[in-house]
Image (tube, rainbow, N blue to C red):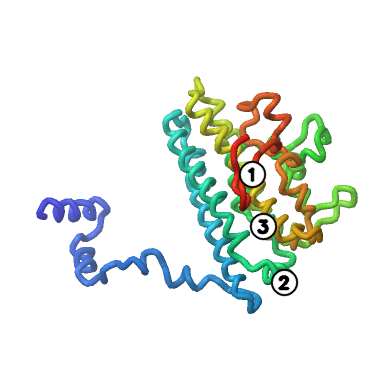
Amino acid sequence: MDSTLNKIVEKYRELGEDPETYLKGLLHAKPITYWDYIEVDTLLSLQKPRTHFKDESVFIMYHQVTELFLKMMLHELEQIVLEKEPSANYLEIKLDRLIKYTSLLINSFDIMRTGMDYEDYNTFRYTLTPASGFQCAQFRLIELHCTSLLNLESKSYTNQLSTKADFMECFDHIYWKDAGIDRKTGEKSLTLQLFEEKYLQKLTDTALTLRGNTLENKIKALPHLPDPLKHKLRRFDHLYNVEWPLVHLHTAEHYLNSKGENKAATGGSEWKKYLHPKYQQRKFFPTLWTKHELKNWGTNVKTKCHGSIEHP
């Protein structure tokens, strides 16, 4: 006990502080509780439904859980890009975590399909217009941490970049803008306008900061790419860019087209083409895939009941 007390005193002396003051504070401090540390009361108060439908709270809570998992993924990726020369072993540990979080998101998405009344959802969702999952900024930030802008280029406009395209030209052709901009007229949907007002500066600043320093860059800088790490990178790439979008697509089909109605998305996008990976062709690590795999990206993926995914 005396040893611990001496270490505490030494700690504050090294900081140029009076240890006695801190010890007096500790003497009168209240003990920490689980609910205060986790901010349980605040967390449970964050659901603000816009309608009287009970299942709207489920919709809100699931998306809040999703945002927390995305924040955990960003937490790992931010550590990776800060490492000047991460080892293969370090990257494997981080990839294991990224795979786990993405898998949890995929496997939990059944809540969106089976956890809400069909008719209720198809009524209260209209109050959400023009909000859309398309406006999830953390999803975009994860992409920017993982790979270069060229790998996020819209495939609808392949070969339209100038020979020496600058950063802003590349960013203007990023794939997710296809969901909110008419390239022929240049007009942006309200969904995209609001998203860019809130996040465009942060996204462009992040992309600029990460140039040459993404997860993709880190693995290219390794003197040798071990097979276990390569397998984990491919697994994460497939989970995030194929399996998760397909689970979203199957859920959207359940609510928007199971009876052949082909309802519009709240954000106004062509949701079938926007969600299906075979159209987006988004890949974080394209050099890790064979020509055949790249050609058949997002196809031949068998799905089980409730929208969960099996490997082909």
Disc 1 to disc 2, C-alpha distance: 28 Å
Give residue 36's position: percent from left, percent from top: 36, 69
- Circle 1 residues within 10 Å: few <14, some 14–19, many ≥20: some
Give residue 95's position: percent from left, percent from top: 49, 38
Question: Between 216 and 226, which is closer to the camera in this rendering?
Answer: 226
Q: Residue furthest front?
A: 305
Disc 3 to disc 2, C-alpha distance: 18 Å
Q: Amino acid at mark 3?
A: Gly
Disc 3 to disc 1, C-alpha distance: 22 Å
In which quarter of the view is residue 127 placed?
bottom right
Q: Amino acid at mark 1?
A: Thr
* Disc ID at residue 133: 3
Q: From what the image shows, is residue 120 above or below residue 308?
A: below
In which quarter of the view is residue 24 placed?
bottom left
Q: How many labels, in total? A: 3
| Circle nearer the N terminus (3, 1) | 3
Which residue does the numbered mark 1 point to in the structure image?
Answer: 303
* Disc ID at residue 123: 2
Q: Say left or right for 171 vs 146.
A: right
Q: Residue at x 58, y 64 (%)?
A: 115
Q: Say left or right for 204 vs 158.
A: left
